[in-house]
Amino acid sequence: MYPFIRMVWQVWKYRKAAPLSVFGTHVSRHVCLPWDIDMWMELNNGRTLTLYDLGRIPMAYRVGLVEVLRRKRWGLTMAGASVRYRRRVRAFETVEMRSRLAYWDARFFYIEQSMWKKSGDCANHIVYRSAVTGKDGIVPPAEVMGELGVEAAAPPAPEWVAAWIEADNVRPWPPMQD
């Protein structure tokens, strides 16, 4: 089940946090609860993706995106993700989550998130391809940035993000069927 109560808690917790620049990093802390673990007694890989929502949505509030989405009647969707798992997160462990906008192009925003253990080790890391949608389809990120009052051009794509974008561009769609 989706962690609605935890989401409400995170939004409420950061409701009075200082506004965040679109280039800033939202930092939050989260506990791996018993219903987040799998049969190997560690944070379930699918639940990891759900927990990343708990960092992204408060970040969107802090940069002013949620207000823009409501005012313009736009939506927000995920269009892809690449995740790397490196360290186990066990029940009742606390992780620090870092969420930031890494890059945008003519169609998509690329959001980078990571979970860090108290030891200083990165447990996992993800990059999401996200789109703002309107009644006519995808809203260009430049238009979204204009609504946020950001006149800056997109930063250069980090090399690893550019490589992922290129790799995903050659991936067949729809996937091959046997």
Image (cartoon, rainbow, N blue to C red):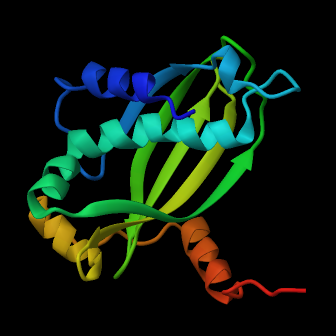
State whether residue 151 appears in this view: no
Residue projecting furthest to the top: 92
Say which residue appears at 50% left-offset and 52% top-offset: 112
Residue 154 lies in quadrant: bottom left
Residue 12 lies in quadrant: top left
118 vs 64, left or right, is right
Q: Is residue 88 above or below residue 101?
A: above
Q: Position of residue 105 (x, y in %)?
A: 37, 77
Q: Is residue 126 above or below residue 54?
A: below
Q: Position of residue 121 (x, y in %)?
A: 69, 29
- Placement of the N terminus among the 4 image quadrants: top right
Q: Nearer the viewer, residue 58 or 50?
A: 50
State whether residue 67 appears in this view: yes
Say which residue appears at 67% left-offset and 53% top-offset: 83
135 vs 72, left or right, is right
Q: Is residue 69 above or below residue 92?
A: below
Say which residue appears at 46% left-offset and 71% top-offset: 157
Say which residue appears at 69% left-offset and 15% top-offset: 34
Q: Is residue 1 above or below residue 168?
A: above
- Placement of the C terminus among the 4 image quadrants: bottom right
Residue 139 lies in quadrant: bottom left
Q: Position of residue 65 (x, y in %)?
A: 21, 52
Q: How many marks?
A: 0
Q: Position of residue 7 (x, y in %)?
A: 40, 29
133 vs 89, left or right, is left
